[in-house]
Image (cartoon, grey):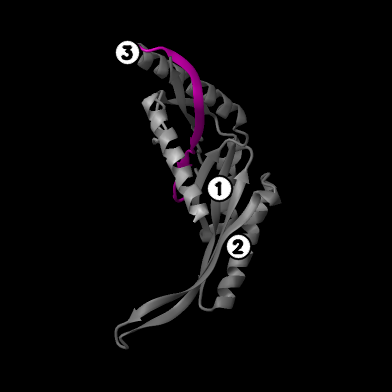
Amino acid sequence: MKNTRWLILFLVVVLAFGAAGCAQGYNVSVTPQQQTGIWVTGQGEVMAVPDIAELRLGVEVQADTVAEAQTQASAAMDKVQQALEDNGVAEKDIQTQRYSIYPVTKWISDKDEQEIVGYRVTNIVVAKIRDVDEAGAIIDAVAEAGGDSTRIQAISFDVDDKTTYYEQARAKAVEDANNKATQLAELADVGLGKATYISEGAAYLPVRADSYDVYPEVGGTTPISPGELKITVQVQMIYQIV
């Protein structure tokens, strides 16, 4: 009973203190955090000339049996890989991406069913070419080495070290954010304070050529144009209003 009286007395004191606080203008309740300040997104872009190319290529062979198709595909792929290495592509820059064996079927009307007429073996690799100017000559060499079994699926271009380009794009993005925040503050007739929050997001768009057939020019080299890459950096910044 004595403990109960002490508990009631304690609650009365707490409630009285809270009422006094409210009377004096103190906010004793918890309110959701409000979004304050000037929020802007800045964007910076720089153009970069590619210095590496990635070539997706390989061989595809069809034969009556799996063993025969594998043997022919292996022989053709050996020639393709040798052509790559002979033209300056390092072994470490050649990576297998796909190897498959599928039956080839044909619909037989008399039997009203599918019949296996052979087997197809596909072996695809990605070769990193570190001298972009040699991409056309390498494609020609591969096409000649693999013959009719050669498959060139795609080529893409990249920059091996994008650090400098990202730094330049980042500087432009922050400058863009500053300019936007300054304009917003002037339009709203408020003072612009320090940045209290910065978040970066980067977007990189490579130049890519999709699947195509290779037809080397007689007495010439297959033309390849790497073009330019656009490297984009976005930053979100929040500024104080003063």
| Amino acid under disc 3 | Leu
Disc 1 crowd rating (10 Å Cα; few below 14, some 14-19, many 20+) is many
Identify which residue is drawn at 37% across, 14% down.
185
> Which of 105/31 is in front?
31
Asked if residue 167 shows in the view, the reply is yes
Asked if residue 220 shows in the view, the reply is no
The residues bearing labels 2 and 1 have C-alpha atoms spaced at a distance of 17 Å
| Amino acid under disc 1 | Leu
Image: magenta residue range:
187-213
The numbered disc on residue 187 is 3
The residues bearing labels 2 and 3 have C-alpha atoms spaced at a distance of 69 Å
Q: Residue 87 appears at what percent x and percent y?
A: 66, 45
Q: In screen coordinates, is 6 left or right of 35?
A: right
The numbered disc on residue 76 is 2
**Residue 165 occupies which quadrant of the picture?**
top right
Q: Secondary structure at mark 3?
A: helix
**Residue 19 occupies which quadrant of the picture?**
top left
N-terminal label among 2 and 1: 1
The numbered disc on residue 55 is 1
